[in-house]
Image (cartoon, helix red, strand yellow):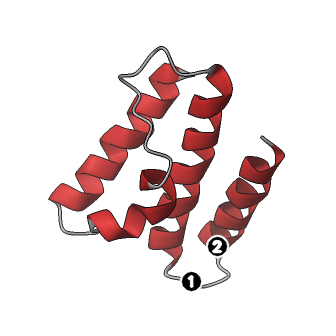
Amino acid sequence: MVRLHKKFVTFKTYLISTGQATESDFRTYNSLEVSPENREEAKETHKEAIFAIGEDIAQKISDGELSEEGRIRERMKELRAEV
């Protein structure tokens, strides 16, 4: 779980470093204040973080359209609500 969380954060960093996103595009994820480096966090916390960052990434990619990415973002939001 932590490894997947770390991969998503790496992708987030890439999007920001290439100018395709800004830190404010990741409000949902950032509000959780959890890092993949903090292995002491509960598995459920990392799981919620993965869905939150996935939701933020999908939102940025879709630019709000109900495209394939938009549907992925909505599904991530649903999964996060189940955590």
- Could you tell me which residue is drawn at 78 percent across and 52 percent down? 81
Q: Which residue is mark 1?
A: 64
Q: Amino acid at mark 1?
A: Gly
Q: Quadrant of residue 70?
A: bottom right
Mark found first going from the N terminus, 1 or 2: 1
Asked if marks 1 and 2 touch (Cβ < 8 Å), the reply is yes
Which amino acid type is marked by label 2? Gly
Find disc 2 in the rendering and name its residue: 70
Left or right: 80 as drawn, with respect to 1: right
Compare residues 66 and 45 and report the one nearer the observer.
45
Residue found at the far right of this picture: 82
CA gap between label 1 and label 2 equals: 7 Å
How far across and down, in percent of the image, does residue 57 sit?
A: 47, 60
Quadrant (top left/top right/bottom left/bottom right) for the C terminus: top right
Q: Is residue 43 left or right of residue 54?
A: right
| Most foreground residue, 55 or 81 | 81
x and y percentages locating residue 10 in the rendered image = 31, 39
7 horizontally vs 1: left or right: left
Residue at 64% from the left image edge and 78% from the top image edge: 67
Quarter of the image that includes the N terminus:
top right
Q: Is residue 16 above or below residue 42?
A: below
Q: Residue furthest bottom?
A: 65
Helix, strand or loop at label 1? It is: loop
